[in-house]
Amino acid sequence: MKISALLTSAGINIGLCVLLLSLYSILRKQPGNVNVYFGRRLAQEHSRLRESFILERLVPSPSWIVKALQYKEEEILAIAGLDAVVFLRILVFSMRIFSIAAIVCIFGVLPLNYFGQEMHHGQIPSASLDVFTIGNVVERSKWLWVHCVALYIISCAACILLYLEYKSIARMRLFHINQSPPNPSHFTVLVRGIPKSTEVPLSDTVKNFFTKYHGSSYLSHQMVYKVGKVQKIMSGAKKACKKFGHLTDTVMDRRCRPAIYRCGLCGGSTTSFQLYQNEFEPNSEKTDRNNSNLIASEEECASAFVFFKTRYAAIVASQVLQTSNPMIWVTDLAPEPDDVYWSNLWLPYKQLWIRRIATLLASIVFMFLFLIPVTFVQGLSQLDQLQQRFPFLKGILKKTFVTQLVTGYLPSVILQLFLYTVPPMMMLFSALEGPMSHSLRKKSACLKVLYFTIWNVFFVNVLSGSVISQLNVISSPKEIPTQLARAVPRQATFFITYVLTSGWASLSSEVMQLFGLIWNFIRRYVLRIKKDPTASSVPSFPYHTEIPKVLLFGLLGFTCSILAPLILPFLLVYFFLGYVVYRNQIINVYCSRYETGGLMWPIVHNTTVFSLLLTQIIAVGVFGLKESPVSAIFTILLVIFTLLFNEYCRQRFHPLFKSYSAQDFIDKDREDEQSGRMEEIHQQLHSAYCQFSPHTGDRCHPETEGEGEEEGQCSTEVNDRNRSQDMKDGLSHPTLSGLPVAKLQRAVKSLSLIIALQNKSSTNV
Amino acid sequence: MKISALLTSAGINIGLCVLLLSLYSILRKQPGNVNVYFGRRLAQEHSRLRESFILERLVPSPSWIVKALQYKEEEILAIAGLDAVVFLRILVFSMRIFSIAAIVCIFGVLPLNYFGQEMHHGQIPSASLDVFTIGNVVERSKWLWVHCVALYIISCAACILLYLEYKSIARMRLFHINQSPPNPSHFTVLVRGIPKSTEVPLSDTVKNFFTKYHGSSYLSHQMVYKVGKVQKIMSGAKKACKKFGHLTDTVMDRRCRPAIYRCGLCGGSTTSFQLYQNEFEPNSEKTDRNNSNLIASEEECASAFVFFKTRYAAIVASQVLQTSNPMIWVTDLAPEPDDVYWSNLWLPYKQLWIRRIATLLASIVFMFLFLIPVTFVQGLSQLDQLQQRFPFLKGILKKTFVTQLVTGYLPSVILQLFLYTVPPMMMLFSALEGPMSHSLRKKSACLKVLYFTIWNVFFVNVLSGSVISQLNVISSPKEIPTQLARAVPRQATFFITYVLTSGWASLSSEVMQLFGLIWNFIRRYVLRIKKDPTASSVPSFPYHTEIPKVLLFGLLGFTCSILAPLILPFLLVYFFLGYVVYRNQIINVYCSRYETGGLMWPIVHNTTVFSLLLTQIIAVGVFGLKESPVSAIFTILLVIFTLLFNEYCRQRFHPLFKSYSAQDFIDKDREDEQSGRMEEIHQQLHSAYCQFSPHTGDRCHPETEGEGEEEGQCSTEVNDRNRSQDMKDGLSHPTLSGLPVAKLQRAVKSLSLIIALQNKSSTNV
C-alpha cells in the first residue's frame, strides 16, 4: 500500500467522521431524539429541552464538544460514578503516553526508518508505506540504538504514568468507599451452598447457623427464591390483587375514609378500625407465615442474603472459611442491590466450577472458529490470491481506486461487521457462567472480549497475514519474537487502516447511536408510542465492548510505535476524539445503575503491561534480525524491569481491588454508631434487596436478556428510594403489583377485613 | 542394553542392598551407634538398649522390618505427627496404584509389546530391552486399544485412589486441628510491616493499633528483635548474670533465707523484705522500662507476634486486609513456636517479593547450569560417542562386563552424586527467600527440588538423551507429545537402571545413615565426646529431599507404565522397601519438631495429576505415531477428564489446606471457655514464643545453617513445657542464661537490691 492509498482511506474516514458528527450535532437538537441522546439526563435530572422550532436546530455546531469538555472530573464522578471516571482515565492515560511516543517516534525514529537504506526516494505520496517502517533499516545499522532509546523512553514513561494512574485510582476507590453514603452491600453477605435438610426449612438453617457462629453481629437474612415458579404464583396473585388494587384506588381512596368517619360518627372512635386491625393482625400474620412456609419450602433455594450489624462483621464473614467443607456455606460480600443477578443466585454452588470451565472452553472454540472470516479478510489485502480464486474480479480490480478501496478499506470493514457479533456472544457465555452480579458478568465478558480481540485482530492478522495459512507459528514459542518482528512492520498498513475504519468510525457510530435513533423513529412514527421511556430504556455504559476496543488500540500503538511510527498520529486523533465522544455519552446518554468502584482498572493495567512486554519482545526479535546484539540485550533488561514493575504494582495496589480494608470499615462503623445512624441503616437493610420489585411489573431487573447491550435498564436512585419507602407503607400504595407474596397475601386479607367491616358498619347504620 | 545387562545391574544392586541392610541390622544392635539409629527414641522416650554383649548382636536379622511394620497408623501419628503419616500415605498410594498398574501392564501390555512385530525371538536374556517397549509394536496395530484400555484403568484407579487419599488426609488434618491440645499458633498472628514512627516506639504502635481495631479480642503482643545486635548484648548480660546466677544458687539458697530470718529476729517481720521489694518494684520497673525502651528503639524490628483471646479472632485478624496500604500491617497466622524462623522475621516485608523473584531466577539459572553434568552423564550411555572423545578408553570398553557396567550403572551413579548437591542449594535459596517458618522454607525447597528433579532427571534425559544436544525441543510445544512418545520408550532402559541405582541404593544409604555413622565414630573414638547428644543432634525428617524422590519415581512409573512395563516390578520393590525403611526411620531416627498438618499433600496430589497428564499426553503422541486415531481421541478425552478431576479436588479440598474453618475454631473456643481452660491458655501464650531461649545457650533454634539436613535440632515437648514453666518461675531457676533482656535486667536489679538489703541488715546487726 502506498501513501496515496492511505491518504484516500484517511480522506474517506475524515469525511465520514465530519459528516456523522455534524449530523449528530443537528440530530441532538431535535426534540424527537431527546430520548436517544439525553437518556441519562431525562431519567436522572428530569431536564427537558425547549420544544420551540428555531433555525439553530438545523445548523451543525461543535458546541457539544465544548460542553462535554467543560465538565470537571468531580462532576462526572457525581453524575456517572467512579467506573465512568476510570474509563475516562484510560483515555487520558492513552493520550498522554501516545503523545510522548508520537513526539519521540515521529522526530526520532521515523526519519531513521525513511533514510535507513540507501535508495532512491521518490515523491512521498507515491512512496510505499513500508519505507516508513523499521523494515527499511539495513542490517547492522549503527542507528538502531535510537530505536532502543525510544523504546526505553516509551516504556519508562508508560510505567511511570501507569503507576500514577493506579495510585490515583486506588485513592479514588478508597475515597469512594469511605465517603459514599451507607451502602447496603457493605453490610450484606451472600451465602451460597446452604446445606439442605429434610427437617428444618432452609431459612431456619441459615438463622441457626449465623446465630450460632456469628451471633454477636448477625442481624437478619433474606432467602433467595427460584424465579420460575414464584413468577407463576406472582402473576396469579397479581391478577387477584389488581382487582383489590382497583378497589383500593377507587373504593378506599374515595369511600373508605368516609366509611371510617361514619364509624366515628356512629359512636366508635377513629382509631377503632386501627384497633380492629391490630387485633386481627397477629392471627393473620401467623397463618401467613404458615402459608409462606409451605410455599417457601418448595421455592427457597440454597442462597440467602445475610445482613450484619456492622460492615466489619460482614467482611469478616465473607472472607473466613465457614466450615470444613468448602463447598457449603460459601460466603461472599454481596453485590449492590441493583447489581444482583437474581436468576443466577439459585444455581447450585457446586455447579459453578463446571459452568466456568465449560464457558471457558466454549469461548476458546468460538475464538478459533472466528479464524475463518478473519482469514478471508486477510485474503483481501493480498489481491493476487483473491484474483486467483475469483477470476471474474480481475476486470474490476484493475482500476486503481477500486484496488485502493479493497486493500485499504474493505478488509477492516468486513472484520468490523464480524466483530459486532462477538460482545453479545461473550455476554451470553458470561451469563451462563453463573456470576452473582451484573458487574461481574460484564467484567467477565470484558475479559473474554479483550482476549478475543487481541487474539483475532492482532495475532491472527499478524501471523496469518504475513504468511497466509501459517498458523503453526504459535506452536514454536522460540520463533515468536522473530516471526512477530518480521510480520508486524509488514502489517502496519493494515493496522493503520484499522485505526481509521474501526476506530474513528466506531466513535462516530457510537455518538450517532444509530440503532437507538432508528428504534426511536419506529417507536414515535410507526408504533406511535409517545410515552417518555425514561426509566426503562436508558442503557448502561457498555464497558465490555468499549474497554477492549480502547485497549486494543493501545496495544496496536505500543507494538507499532518504534516499528511503524506512522500509526501514532492517527491513534492520537482516535484517543482525542474518543475522549470527547465518551465524555459526551457518559454525561448525556448512558446511565450507571451500579458501581464497581473502578474494578476494571486492574484489567487495564495488566493489558497495558502486556502490550509493553509484547512490544519489547518484538523489539528483541527485530534487533535480532537486524543483528544488533547490544540493543537486544538492553531490551531484555527492559523486559525484566517491566515485569518487576508489574509485580510491584500487583503487590502494592491489587489487594485494594480485591477486598476492603478493616481499618476503613471499622472507622466508618464507629462513626455511624456514634452519630446514631446505625439504627436507620439497619432499618433500610431489610428492604434493600427486593427480588420481586414493583418496577417492571414482573421483576426488579431484566434478567433474561442475553445480549446485554440493552441490559442496563435505568432507574434513578431517587425512584428506588421512593419505591422502597412506598413498599413499607404497604396499603396506601396505588399500584400493588409486584410486592412479595407474603405482603400481598396480607394485603388481600386486610382488604377483605376492611370490606367485611364496612359491610358490618353499613348494616349497623 | 540387553536383558542380561539389566540383570547384571539388578544383581549388583540387590547384592548391595542385602549387604547394606544386613550390615544395618548388625550395626543397629551396637550400643555405640544408638545415637545414630535411635535418635528419636533416645530423645523422646529416654529408652535405653541393654548394654551387655551377646552373640545376637553380630548376627544379621530382619527383625527390624517386622518391628517397623508392627506400628499402627495411630501410633505413628502419636509418635511422629501427621506429616510423617502423610509421607507414608504417599508410599501406600504408590504401592497401591503401581500394583494395579503392574498387574494390568505385565499381563496385558507386555506380551503385546513383545509379540508386537513379526520377528525372530531369541532367548529372552539376550533380547534387547527395546523389544519389551511399545516401540516394538507395528504401526496401525489392531492391538493398540489394549494400551488405551490399560491407560484408562490406570488413570481411573489413580484418580479414585487420589480422591480417597485427599479425602482421608483432609479428614486427618481436621481431626488433628480439632483434637490436638491448645496450640499457641492458633491464637497468634504474626504482623509484619509495622509502620515506623519517630515519636512512638514500635511496641506502642502495635498496641495502639490492635487495641483500636481489634480491642475486644486483643490480648497482648511480643516484638521481634534483630538477632545480630541483641545477641551481643545478651552474651554480655549473660556473663554478668552467670555470676549473679551463681550467687543466687549458692548465696541465696543457703544464706539468704537465714538473712531474712535474721531480719525477723531483729524486730522486722518476715514480710518486711517482701514489702521493701514491693515498694521498690514499681520504681525499678519504670526505670527498667525506660532502659528497655532505649534498647528496644534500636533493636525492635517491624514484626511482632500478636496474641488474641480466641482462635477465631486470630484467624479473622490474619485473613482480613488491615489497612488501605497492603504493604503495611501484613498479618498471617503465626507458625508454631518451634517452627518460627526467627532470623527471617526482621526482614522488611517490602523486600520479600524481590527476594522471592530473585531466588526464583537463581533456581532457574541453577537448573539450567545443571544441564552440563547431565549431558555428560547421558554421553556415557552412548558408548560410541564416548570412545570417540576419549580414545584411550577403547581397550577397557571392549570387555563386555565393563561395557555393561558403564552403560547400565555408571551414568546414574554419577548423576546421583551431582544430585546430592541440589537439596542444600535449594534450602539455601529458600532461606534467602525469607519464609517466616522452617516448615514453609522446607515446603518451598521441596517444590524447588521437585521441579529440579523432574526437569533434570526426566525431561533433560528424555529429550537430550534421544538426540543429544537437541534442547530446542522445548521451543515447539506442538512437537512435544511426538518427541516424548519417541524418546520415552528409548530411555526406558536408563529409567530402569535409575530406579535400581538411585532408588534402591538411596534407600539403603538412608537406612544406614552413613554420614551419621561416621560422625558418631569420630565423636566417640577420635574426639572422645561421650555425652548423649539427645536433644541437640537428632535431625528432623528431610521432607524436601524424600518427597521429590518418591514423586519422581511415581512420575517414571506412570510415564513408562504402558510404554515400557518392565520398569514396574522394580518400582514396586522400591516402594515396598521404601515403606519399610521410612517407617523404621520415622519411628527410630528422625524427630518432628513442628507440625504442618499435612500441608505437603497438595504438592503430592498436584504432582501425581501432572504425572498422569504427562503419561496421557505421551500416549496421545504414541497413538499418533502408531496411526491409531481412535485411541488418540479416547486418550484426549481422558486428559480432559483428568483435568476436571483435578479441578474438582482443588475446589473441594484445597481450601482446607490454606485456611482453618471458622466453625471448628469457634466450637473449640467455646469448649475451652466453658471448661475454664481459656485463662490457662492465655497464661501460656505469653511465654510460648521466646526468641532467646535458654536452650542452646544462644538461641532457641539453629537458624544460621543453610543445608537443613541438620536443621531440626530436636527438643522434646515435655522439656519445652518444663522450660517455659521454669521461665515463669524466674529467679528460682538454676540457669538464667537465655532469658529475655527485660527479665534479666529486672533480675539483676532485684538481686542487687537483695544484696544491698543484706549488707544493710548485716551492718545493722
Image (cartoon, coloured by chain):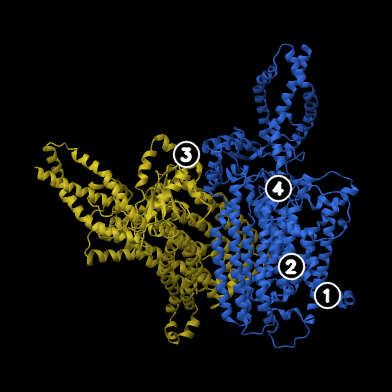
Chain colours: A yellow, B blue
Chain letter for mark 2: B
Q: Amino acid at mark 3?
A: Asp
Element at badge 3?
helix
Dot 4 or dot 1: first in sequence order is 1
Asked whether A418 or B29 is in front, the reply is B29
What's the CA distance linking mark 2 and mark 4? Answer: 31 Å
N-term mark: 2 or 4? 2
Q: Do marks 4 and 1 share a chain?
A: yes
Amino acid type, callout 2 = Val
Mark 2: few, some, or many residues within 10 Å (few <14, many ≥20)?
some
Q: Is residue B210 left or right of residue B509?
A: left
Instruction: Name the residue beneath numbered marker 2.
Output: B573
Mark 1, Cα crowd under 10 Å, few <14 / some 14-19 / many 20+, is many
Q: From what the image shows, is residue B443 above or below residue A449?
A: above
Residue B446 lies, in percent from the top left, at 69, 57
Label 4 – label 1 distance at C-alpha: 45 Å
